[in-house]
């Protein structure tokens, strides 16, 4: 009995941890969390959305036939949104004390976050729009007791004049205290917009209402994230807490009431409501989560749900060669289990679009991971925005005579190791004198692994990659390691043009990996343009700085993939690099890779297709340092073992279908995976 009791306690703790996801890891007073990318919470019929369930509870918004919004694919950073056309809306839980009413009756404080955009033009007579609203009267359009909260947009505001609306058009909260202004500076002036609306612009918005009489509303989006929120007073009389009465008879998406007044035209990707204030630290974590997920760049630092700074805006504002400011067009990939974030491909919506297509003349970059990431691993990219004209300054020492470089360069700040990535660069609208788009030998991606951005130095720590292919004007670079640069994990990269001129570059590295297997480390690398290569010298280090040669492999012009095994490497961290030597004596180093042999029996397991919906097959993925057999058990939350299977696993990644779950009921299950003396446990939810 004691064994079962303690096992149940462990299961309860596991389940609590797995369900404890929240935006930026901020869960206190979280009332409403809607995510357009959470397909398990959407109930569509032929593209129309019938219901949208909260991601933090079983409450939901519903739509009547004929007024359903639609699911729009790839709206923001490869992810979907919910599209409203001005004649569609959804209603949610309402009423005093009703579970799921986002802001409790007469609550003195709240916070609203949203990711949204609208194409509505800024014109005289432009309509009021409510992205989300909570109000006193559910049905009537013209009541005098709104006394609620909302994300309010007024595209025509700039034409009405002060004090009610100003130029440019504002947006924000509207607590409905006379004179009913929103998104503008504090009383008595009300003559300057804090948050301004521009059509077709993706916004991350925060409306933070404080429990005080003056300066009680903080307004923020990505445009003032770096400097701090704008502050205004909702009540000119300075008696906001008495005059502002939150009510909960109505709870709507896409309109102000059931009468469909002030309807919203645009896209809503995520909506978060807290029934309390948000601190500055919490705000940073929530904004960081939303920015990385939806590809909307911020001007300040990024913080993970664990409180780690994953993009240091202060350090990156004056960094490296020429003290460049890299806080431009920031985007990235990463895994943050506390937020439920798993961004595997990304571009900045300041240079690209929702489906990754680039804006002309912006040199849009898309980064995509090639393998599963671990929690709290991030790779974030920022531009110094130096322009995309061709220049011959700061050229790498190994660049062929006649080469040019696009003036802009990018810094990568990595936390952990996301593994190899694929990177694409869009040449649409860019000059390329002497180069031909589609000719892979004319261009190079060059990495400065010492991270200072001075490409004229550090030849031993530079890598060159030719495009593996072109898709129209987009160059595709595959198998790139952008993690673990020598300067605090940072790498700077640039794009070379006219790279085929003059003497050819040394061999182009396309990939290099180090994989533990027992007490050995298997090194594998791939190259291209290796016709002039002679030999590959393998260097080893235990500190990542001081290297010694441990072997060499001869080049074959007809072979592009090579391997070498470091036998009996011993426990601890190991670093490797390859020096390729040409027939004429010219040489170039690979990137540095590492392998940890501190626990050669450890492995990583994750659930795929979780939750399991309908006829979808439950699967797990095991990443093991060596081949062996895995014992896989399915347990219910009552502590009963339901099924067992033995599965052979390979060194590296093995995907395993869990057919033994096919006949099980819809509920939560615990999966225990044991290899050798190590056991890993995870939860799979079957819907």
Image: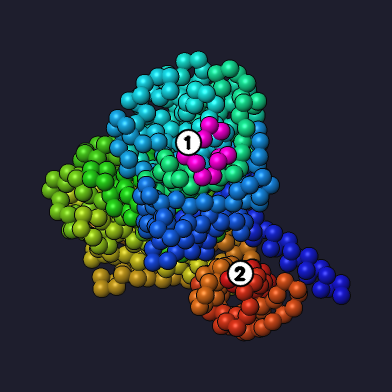
**Identity of the residue drawn at 31% across and 58% down:** 477
Circle 1 crowding by C-alpha within 10 Å: few under 14, some 14–19, many from 20 = few
Is 313 situated left or right of 672 in this image? left
Is 561 situated left or right of 617 in this image? left
Q: Is residue 449 visible?
A: no
User: Quick one: 41 or 516, which is closer to the camera?
Assistant: 41
Numbered marks: total? 2
Q: Is residue 390 above or below residue 66?
A: above
**Residue denoted by label 2:** 685
Quadrant assignment for the N terminus? bottom right
Q: Closer to us: mark 1 or mark 2?
A: 1
User: Quick one: 540 or 634, which is closer to the camera?
Assistant: 634
| Magenta stretch: includes residue 146 | no
Quadrant assignment for the C terminus? bottom right
Residue lying at the far right in this picture: please name it.
1
**Identity of the residue drawn at 20% across and 58% down:** 472
- The local secondary structure at tag 1 comes to loop
Is 666 situated left or right of 179 in this image? right
Counting residues from the N terminus, which is met first, the one under dot 1 or under dot 2?
1
Residue 479 in the image, given as x and y percentages of width and height: 37, 61
Residue 72 in the image, given as x and y percentages of width and height: 37, 57
Residue lying at the far top in this picture: please name it.
188
Residue 478 in the image, given as x and y percentages of width and height: 34, 61
Q: Quadrant of residue 619?
A: bottom right
CA gap, disc 1 to disc 2? Answer: 45 Å
**Residue denoted by label 1:** 142
The secondary structure that most of the magenta stretch takes on is loop
- The local secondary structure at tag 2 comes to strand
Q: Are marks 1 and 2 in contact (CB under 8 Å)?
A: no
The residue range painted magenta reads 135-145
């Amino acid at each position: 009995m004691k064994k079962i009791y303690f096992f149940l306690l462990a299961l309860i703790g596991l389940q609590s941890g797995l369900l404890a996801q929240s935006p930026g890891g901020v869960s206190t007073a979280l009332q409403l969390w809607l995510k357009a990318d959470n397909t398990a919470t959407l109930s569509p019929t032929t593209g129309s959305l019938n219901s949208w369930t909260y991601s933090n509870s079983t409450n939901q918004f519903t739509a009547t036939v004929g007024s359903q919004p639609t699911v729009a694919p790839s709206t923001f950073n490869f992810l979907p949104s919910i599209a409203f056309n001005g004649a569609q809306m959804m209603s949610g839980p309402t009423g005093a004390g009703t579970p799921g009413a986002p802001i409790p009756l007469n609550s003195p404080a709240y916070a609203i976050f949203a990711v949204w955009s609208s194409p509505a033009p800024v014109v005289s007579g432009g309509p009021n729009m409510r992205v989300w609203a909570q109000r006193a009267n559910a049905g009537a359009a013209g009541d005098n007791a709104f006394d609620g909260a909302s994300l309010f947009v007024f595209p025509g505001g700039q034409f009405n004049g002060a004090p009610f609306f100003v130029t440019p058009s504002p947006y924000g909260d509207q607590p409905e205290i006379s004179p009913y202004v929103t998104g503008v500076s504090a009383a008595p002036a009300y003559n300057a917009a804090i948050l301004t609306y521009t059509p077709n612009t993706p916004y991350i918005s925060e409306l933070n209402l404080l429990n005080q009489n003056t300066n009680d509303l903080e307004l923020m989006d990505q445009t003032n994230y770096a400097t701090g929120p704008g502050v205004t007073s909702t009540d000119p009389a300075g008696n906001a807490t008495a005059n502002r009465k939150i009510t909960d008879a109505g709870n709507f998406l896409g309109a102000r009431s059931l009468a469909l007044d002030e309807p919203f035209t645009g896209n809503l990707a995520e909506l978060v409501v807290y029934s309390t204030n948000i601190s500055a630290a919490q705000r940073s974590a929530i904004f960081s989560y939303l920015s990385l997920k939806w590809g909307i760049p911020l001007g300040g630092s990024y913080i993970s749900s664990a409180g780690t700074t994953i993009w240091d805006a202060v350090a990156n504002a004056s960094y490296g060669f020429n003290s460049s400011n890299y806080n431009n067009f920031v985007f990235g990939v990463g895994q943050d289990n506390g937020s439920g974030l798993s961004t595997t491909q990304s571009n900045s919506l300041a240079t690209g679009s929702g489906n990754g297509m680039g804006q002309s003349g912006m040199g849009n970059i898309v980064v995509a991971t090639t393998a599963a990431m671990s929690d709290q691993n991030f790779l974030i990219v920022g531009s110094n925005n130096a322009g995309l004209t061709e220049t011959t300054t700061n050229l790498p020492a190994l660049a062929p005579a006649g080469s040019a470089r696009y003036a802009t360069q990018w810094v990568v700040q990595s936390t952990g190791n996301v593994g190899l990535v694929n990177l694409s660069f869009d040449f649409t609208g860019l000059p390329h004198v002497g180069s031909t788009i589609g000719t892979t030998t004319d261009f190079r991606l060059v990495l400065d692994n010492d991270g200072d951005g001075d490409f004229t130095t550090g030849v031993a720590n530079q890598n060159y990659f030719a495009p593996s292919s072109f898709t129209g004007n987009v160059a595709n670079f595959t198998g790139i390691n952008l993690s673990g640069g020598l300067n605090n994990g940072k790498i700077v990269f640039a794009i070379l043009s006219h790279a085929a001129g003059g003497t050819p570059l040394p061999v182009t590295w396309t990939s290099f990996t180090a994989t533990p297997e027992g007490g050995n480390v298997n090194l594998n690398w791939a190259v291209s343009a290796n016709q002039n290569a002679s030999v590959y010298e393998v260097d080893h280090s235990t500190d990542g700085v001081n290297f010694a040669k441990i072997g060499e492999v001869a080049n074959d012009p007809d072979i592009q993939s090579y391997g070498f095994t470091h036998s009996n490497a011993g426990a601890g961290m190991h670093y490797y690099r390859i020096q390729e030597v040409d027939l004429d004596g010219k040489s170039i180093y690979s990137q540095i890779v590492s392998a940890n042999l501190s626990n050669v029996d450890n492995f990583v397991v994750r659930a795929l297709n979780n939750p399991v919906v309908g006829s979808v097959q439950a699967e797990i993925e095991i990443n093991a340092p060596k081949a062996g057999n895995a014992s896989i058990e399915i347990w219910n939350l009552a502590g009963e073992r339901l099924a067992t299977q033995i599965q052979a696993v390979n060194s590296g990644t093995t995907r395993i279908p869990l057919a033994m779950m096919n006949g099980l009921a819809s509920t939560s299950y615990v999966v225990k995976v044991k290899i050798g003396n190590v056991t890993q446990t995870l939860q799979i939810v079957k819907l």
